Structure formats: structure tokens, C-alpha cells
């Protein structure tokens, strides 16, 4: 579990895809790649939309993946190209702060999520861990300063990189092409900058850094992308992140069909609406049972605090929440918060204007 991603020596000529990618890289950048990085997509077997509620999931990696050919350049720029002409070239100087435009989630912003994650080594997990304990104001300020320092002093100056990305995961089809891209980019950024991180650390960093694009995922996709192993699905549990083998039945074949209807998660609010709904439900359930809702953001945290079984949680949901839509006014009234608090503390950027 705590191991680092493996580095393999592969004969390029024995692999058609690598050979083509190498040629495309050479044609594009006039030199050979220094190394290749690869991260798989995934299919989830059990547990849809519950990772961001803190609950365990059972995904497995698929053979479709994001592969990148990389060289380190002395130009001080990150320059990106893609084997799929639908994804345009991109270039940014390493001296500039990495800016990710959530309003226009182009493919290279996912790539930059991975770069930025490694650069600043996102410390959100650390924050949440500490937040669970009761903090006084001074401790909280120290924690914030520590977080800011970490953000500032990750990698002071990124290495220039030239990359060609080649993906085989159908995009926006629920097989997590976005996370595979973020993970691949995090991995290659780590390697290009001579850093060393365990797979678990990489998974945690990439889970947080994909949120730069705006989707508030729970971490399943990045975890399985780094922690998957051949021949086994993985039970992924959170806080702390861990993965346990779940042997697949002998001879089992999994068929994944594609309805060819795409859903771009970052370009719409559908995904985050569900995340935010679960967050609001968490607060309401906590409030109804006399818990302090501050610091509770995930349904699993309420269950832990109440020492309740899943069945008891279902009863609680039926008792406390009504199936009809909640208005903003009602949410604010029930939670005893202002409309501003609702916006800043509970809603994501792309769910601010929902009814
Ligand atoms: P998914 O369910 O596949 O994760 P998302 O909507 O979250 O769907 O992410 C899809 C986005 O990921 C695409 O719009 C594109 O920006 C990016 N992406 C996926 N595959 C590739 C690829 N091969 N090359 C570049 N970007 C890709
Ligand atoms: Mg995605």
C-alpha cells in the first residue's frame, strides 16, 4: 500500500501504441521522450456516488488508460499536445501561477490539475484531519498559516515539460477519463521534478487536485487509478485511504456497454448538485439529532458520531428529510444559517444559483 508507483523498462518496438506515440512525440517536439507515464480508467462495481459521503466503494481498473510521453525541457514551459486532434495544443511558462478555468474546462486544465497538485502538494486532507478535533482560534490560525506555507513551498519552480497525451478511455462516459488524466499528469510531474511519493499520497493529492476544475469528487477514481492491481477489484475505504483486494470470481467477465451519451461533469452542475445535496442532508440529520453540524460535511461522519447502523440511518433519513424539493429559504431556516453562509459554506461554485 505505501509503495511507490512502479517504474518499468519496456521495449518500445514491442508495443505498437508506444511506438506510434514516440513517433508523434518526435514529430511534434523534435526529440525523443525521456519517459512515459500511464494511469488507468475504472469501472465501479458497488457504491455509486457515495465516496464523497465518506463511504467505501468497490471499483476495479480497466485496460483503457491515459498514456503520456514526456521529456524535460530547458525552455521553462509546459507544452502539451494530444494524439486526438479534438484536443488542442497548449503551452504555459513554468514561471506563471497555474490558473485553472472552471468556466471553460478544456482538456489541458485537467492536466494542469495534476501539475498543480504536485506543485503545491494539496494539504486539504491534513486540514480535515485536524478540523475533526476541536480547535481553538489560535490553533486554527496556525493550521491555516501552515497550509498556506505548504501551498507556497511545494515545488518553487517546476521543471519545463513537453508531453504528448494519448487516451483510450471514452471521455465523459463514466469510466473516469478525467481522473486518469489528472493522475497521469500528477505522476509525470512528480517524475519530471525528481520527487518521490507513495501511491497512496499520489492518490490523495490527485483526488484533491481534480477539484481545481470544479468537480467535488470523493476520491474513488484517483485511488483506484493508483492502487489497482491486476486480477482483483479493490475495496477502497477512506480516512485513512486504504485498498483491500476483492478477488473476482474465477472466469468472470465484465461487460461495460456505452450508451454514447456523454456527460461532461465539470461543464455542468449535475455532479456537484448531488454532492451538495448530500452535504446539506448531513447538516440536517446532524442538527435533528442534536449534533454540532460544524465540522460535519459527510453522511458517514454523522453515522459515526451517532454510532448508528446503516438501517438506523435509513430510518433517520425518513424521519428527518422530506422527499419534496427544499427551497433555499427552508434550508437556511432548518439549519439556522444565512443565505450567504449557504453559498460560501455549503454550495459549490457551480451550484450557487440553483433553486
Ligand atoms: P469521465 O466520466 O470520463 O471522467 P468527465 O466529464 O469527468 O468524464 O471528464 C471528461 C473530460 O476529460 C473531457 O472533456 C476531456 O477534457 C478530458 N479527457 C478525457 N480523455 C481525454 C484524452 N484522451 N485527452 C485529453 N483529455 C481527455
Ligand atoms: Mg470524471
Image (tube, rainbow, N blue to C red):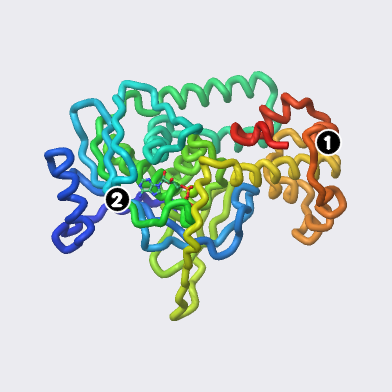
Say which of 286 and 15 sits in front: 15
Residue 161 relative to residue 114: left or right? left
Residue under pointer 1 = 330
Tell me if residue 124 comes above or below residue 150 in the rendering: below
The residue depicted at 29 percent of the width and 41 percent of the height is: 191
Image point (45%, 76%), residue name: 253
Looking at marks 2 and 1 on the same chain, the residue that comes earlier in the sequence is marked by: 2
Image-quadrant location for residue 95:
top left
Residue furthest bottom in the image:
251
Q: Is the C-beta of the residue carrying label 2 under 8 Å from the nearest atom of ligand 1?
A: yes
User: Which residue corresponds to the image point at 49% horizontal and 77% vertical from the top-left?
Assistant: 249
Instruction: Please state if 347 lies on the left or on the right of 210 as rendered.
Output: right
Residue 140 location in percent, x, y? 63, 23
| Secondary-structure class at tag 1 | helix
Residue 153 percent location from the top left of the image? 41, 24
Q: Is residue 292 visible?
A: no
| The label number, if any, that marks residue 166 in the structure image | 2
The quarter in which the C terminus is drawn is top right
Q: Residues within 10 Å of mark 1 (few under 14, many from 20)?
A: few
**For this rendering, which residue is in front, 196 or 256?**
256
Q: Residues within 10 Å of mark 2 (few under 14, many from 20)?
A: many
Q: Nearer the viewer, residue 353 or 148?
A: 353
Amino acid at each position: 500500500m505505501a509503495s511507490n508507483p512502479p517504474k518499468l523498462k519496456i521495449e518500445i518496438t514491442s508495443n505498437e501504441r508506444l511506438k506510434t506515440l514516440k513517433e508523434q512525440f518526435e514529430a511534434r517536439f523534435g526529440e525523443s521522450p525521456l519517459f512515459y507515464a500511464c494511469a488507468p480508467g475504472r469501472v465501479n462495481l458497488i457504491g455509486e456516488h457515495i465516496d464523497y459521503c465518506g463511504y467505501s466503494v468497490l471499483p476495479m481498473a480497466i485496460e483503457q488508460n491515459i498514456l503520456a510521453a514526456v521529456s524535460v525541457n530547458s525552455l521553462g514551459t509546459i507544452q502539451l499536445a494530444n494524439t486526438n486532434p479534438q484536443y488542442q495544443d497548449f503551452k504555459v511558462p513554468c514561471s506563471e501561477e497555474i490558473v485553472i478555468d472552471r468556466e471553460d474546462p478544456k482538456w489541458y486544465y485537467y492536466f494542469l490539475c495534476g501539475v498543480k497538485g504536485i506543485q503545491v502538494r494539496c494539504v486539504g486532507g491534513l486540514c480535515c484531519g485536524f478540523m475533526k478535533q476541536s480547535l481553538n482560534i489560535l490553533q486554527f490560525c496556525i493550521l491555516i498559516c501552515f497550509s498556506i506555507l505548504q501551498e507556497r513551498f511545494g515545488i518553487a519552480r517546476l521543471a519545463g515539460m513537453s508531453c504528448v497525451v494519448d487516451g483510450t478511455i471514452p471521455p465523459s462516459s463514466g469510466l473516469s477519463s478525467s481522473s486518469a488524466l489528472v493522475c497521469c499528469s500528477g505522476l509525470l510531474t512528480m517524475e519530471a521534478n525528481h520527487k518521490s511519493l507513495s501511491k497512496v499520497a499520489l492518490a490523495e493529492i490527485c483526488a484533491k487536485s481534480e477539484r481545481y476544475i470544479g468537480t467535488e469528487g470523493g476520491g474513488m477514481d484517483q485511488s483506484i487509478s493508483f492502487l489497482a492491481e491486476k486480477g482483483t477489484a479493490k475495496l477502497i475505504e477512506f480516512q485513512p485511504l486504504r485498498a483491500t483486494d476483492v478477488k473476482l470470481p474465477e472466469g468472470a467477465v465484465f461487460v461495460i456497454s456505452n450508451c454514447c451519451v456523454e456527460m461532461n461533469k465539470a461543464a455542468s452542475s449535475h455532479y456537484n448538485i448531488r454532492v451538495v445535496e448530500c452535504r446539506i442532508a448531513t447538516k440536517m440529520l446532524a442538527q435533528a439529532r442534536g449534533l454540532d453540524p460544524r465540522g460535519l460535511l459527510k453522511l458517514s461522519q454523522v453515522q459515526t458520531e451517532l454510532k448508528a447502523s446503516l438501517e438506523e440511518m435509513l430510518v433517520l433519513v425518513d424521519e428527518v428529510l422530506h422527499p419534496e424539493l427544499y427551497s433555499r429559504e427552508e434550508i437556511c431556516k432548518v439549519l439556522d444559517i444565512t443565505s450567504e453562509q449557504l453559498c460560501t459554506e455549503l454550495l459549490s461554485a457551480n451550484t450557487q444559483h440553483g433553486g
